[in-house]
Amino acid sequence: MMRISDTVKHLIIINVIMFIGTIFVGQGVLFYDWFAMHFPKHGAFQPWQIITHMFMHGGADLNNLSLMHIGFNMFALWMFGTPVEQVLGSKKFLFIYISAGLGAVALQVGYYYFDFYSAFSGIADLNMNNDLLSKIISIDASDGAYIKGELLGKQMTPILAEYNFDSNLINEANFKSLFNMNVMARNTMVGASGCIMGIMAAFGMMNPNAELMMIFLPIPIKAKYFIPGIILLDLISGITGQSFFSPSNTAYFAHVGGALTGFLIMWYWKKTQFNKNRWN
């Protein structure tokens, strides 16, 4: 059995501690609000979430998916992270890990912004000020697993009055756009998946002929085919919304962003610092 490397071990410990905190601190809700990555236009967003979300898994609704999320991620971190750290050393390994997490945020949030501002075009004629719009898109209009337009409308009324905004100016199309913006602004990101995809990309470049297998597809596939294949499926899922092997709420573009960042870092290091046969 492969002996776990030091940085990987510490990262797993931090992730487990954060997972426990999510379960027990404020019934999951408070901890999640503090440390999950919220959409920057949402009132719950804080700058530190850009980093802390990388160590978060699950939420208040702890279930088998939450356990599978952290379980698979920590297994992948051990399996791919240990050999990468053993070759590159802890500093370079951690640089790829955090950079891939940042690349994941950049691409996923960029995608959210694209959708958000596409909906924003539907209310441009209302000329709402930023504070008013921020309060509207931060309204919690959820009822269980669903976000309801009637709840949004009900909570919007006093906010519009507070800002002396004439609610009669909002037609059906405007309200639909506000509803869509509210839904999109509620998107959050948690998990080490983006970081791990960057480490997987590094592993694939270092060990292109290593044979890997999926649990549900026990056929050995070389890393140089397996890892790009996983990334391609994530890209297709992000574009089409069709999930192949991940839950439907997966941040697919975060996976792509993390993998692309890991690849670019390794490509740059190989080109500028290492000869054909050296990686450290």
Image: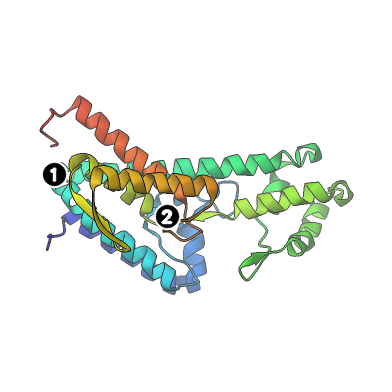
Residue at the spot of label 2: 53
Q: Amino acid at mark 2?
A: His
Residue at the spot of label 1: 87
Residue 160 in the figure: left or right of residue 180: right
Q: Position of residue 212 (x, y in %)?
A: 23, 53
**Category of crowding for the residue at label 2, using alpha-carbon neighbours closer than 10 angstroms: few (below 14), some (14–19), many (at least 20):** many
Q: Position of residue 173 (x, y in %)?
A: 80, 47
Residue 45 in the image: above or below residue 264: below
Quadrant of the snapshot with the N terminus: bottom left
Quadrant of the snapshot with the C terminus: top left
Q: In this view, which residue lies farthest toward the right?
A: 168
Residue 100 in the figure: left or right of residue 23: left
Residue 82 in the image: above or below residue 201: below
For the point 40% across and 44% down, the residue is: 232
Q: Answer whether labels 2 and 1 touch (C-beta < 8 Å).
A: no
In this rendered view, identify the residue nearer to me: 205 or 278: 205
Residue 98 in sight from this viewpoint: no
The quadrant where residue 10 appears: bottom left
Residue 194 in the figure: left or right of residue 107: left
Element assignment for label 1: helix
For the point 31% across and 34% down, the residue is: 264
The quadrant where residue 150 appears: bottom right
In this rendered view, identify the residue nearer to me: 131 or 133: 133
In this rendered view, identify the residue nearer to me: 51 or 63: 63
Q: Position of residue 54 (x, y in %)?
A: 38, 53
Q: Mark 2 to mark 1: distance in Å?
A: 27 Å
**Category of crowding for the residue at label 1, using alpha-carbon neighbours closer than 10 angstroms: few (below 14), some (14–19), many (at least 20):** some
